[in-house]
Image (cartoon, rainbow, N blue to C red):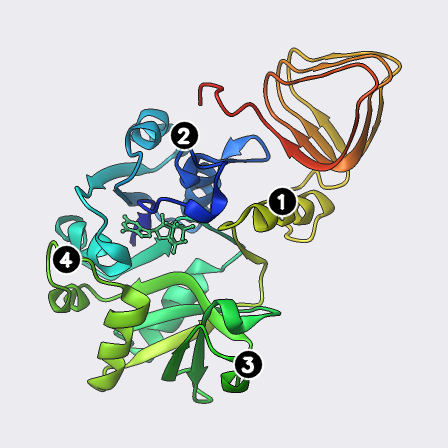
Amino acid sequence: MKAVILVGGEGTRLRPLTCNRPKAMVPVLNTPFLEHVIHHLARHQVREIVLAMGHLAQPIEGYLGDGSRFGVRLSYVVEEAPLGTAGAIKNAEKYLDDTFLALNGDIFADLDITAMASFHRQCRAKVTIALTPVDDPTQYGLVETDERGRILRFVEKPSPEEITTNRVNAGTYVIEPDVLAQIPPGTNVSIERETFPRLLASGEPVYAYPSSGYWMDTGTPEKYLQLHRDLLSGRSGYYPLAGEVVTGEGCHIHPSAQIRGPVVIGSNCTIDRDVRIIGPVVIGNGCTVLEGALVGDSVIWLSLIHI
Ligand code: GTP
């Protein structure tokens, strides 16, 4: 199965981290976010991936290239003006001739894509939407289903009295290619607010695949930090070295420095005399922590470093 990843958003809520780099290239554990997503897809045998880009496209293509380093084949489509989540998928139509996966490019999830795709086929669905439980559904799109998972209703950003479920749209979809015929080309269209409700209204089989695995959208600085806390503490199961102190190549760590995990220190860092680093902490490649500093519950990186 092919996948299209949406990476054309401006990431305004994640500023200043996204002032001069695309949200997809913001580092997670010192590796660009999108690289983690691509590895996850490759583990589920997704080998052909289209990146739907707009804002700040060049740094993404420059870093990922043809994808061979990651065991996948990458193609790129670039929008002149933002086309929204459905318009961006439509823009990648020439690559999408069979059932395909579409993902928001800012979601970190342990989703079982293989199981989701087989659920989609069993249900003979037009679209299957992954669902995840969240504590506060008012920020998201609620999805109500019947007992077999067929979607009955969407409620976008519900008010507290509209909350009937804590399962929300997880930003990952399996889609039949004929759905693309319903999206006008070159037009800004939202898949969650326009395309999916329209399919539902016309009686098409739209299903939900509930996931209970780890899920985090990295849309805001608070969530970005929380993602690191979760990975470093082992809450997601994604990071095998949770709890440990991991140091990259070429670091100079003064013997008087105290480092308590979980901590990840990137390559070529300098940690001066009497520094204390109390995890969860991630220090980016090439950083220097000066004498006597105390660092805790933080992710630090150089914003101008070459990625
Ligand atoms: P904010 O400005 O902070 O809301 O972030 P955002 O622009 O990334 O928007 P949002 O979080 O709603 O986007 C969800 C996902 O869809 C992200 O991976 C975006 O990169 C992507 N996305 C949003 N709008 C577009 C678009 O017009 N074109 C493309 N290609 N991707 C988009």
Q: Tell me: 118 left or right of 197.
A: right
Q: Residue placed at 63% from the left, 13% from the top?
A: 268
Q: Is residue 297 above or below residue 4?
A: above
Three-letter amino acid code of the residue under disc 2? Asn
Disc on the earlier residue, 1 or 3 = 3
Where residue 124 sits in the image (x, y, percent)?
28, 77
Disc on the earlier residue, 3 or 4 = 3
Disc on the earlier residue, 4 or 1 = 4
**Residue marked by disc 2:** 20
Real-space Cα distance between discs 4 and 1?
A: 35 Å
**Residue marked by disc 3:** 160
Query: Marks 3 and 1: in contact by CB < 8 Å?
Result: no
Real-space Cα distance between discs 2 and 4?
A: 27 Å
Three-letter amino acid code of the residue under disc 1? Leu
Query: Marks 1 and 4: in contact by CB < 8 Å?
Result: no
Residue 151 appears in view: no
Real-space Cα distance between discs 3 and 4?
A: 33 Å
Q: Tell me: 276 left or right of 67.
A: right
Q: Quadrant of residue 146?
A: bottom left
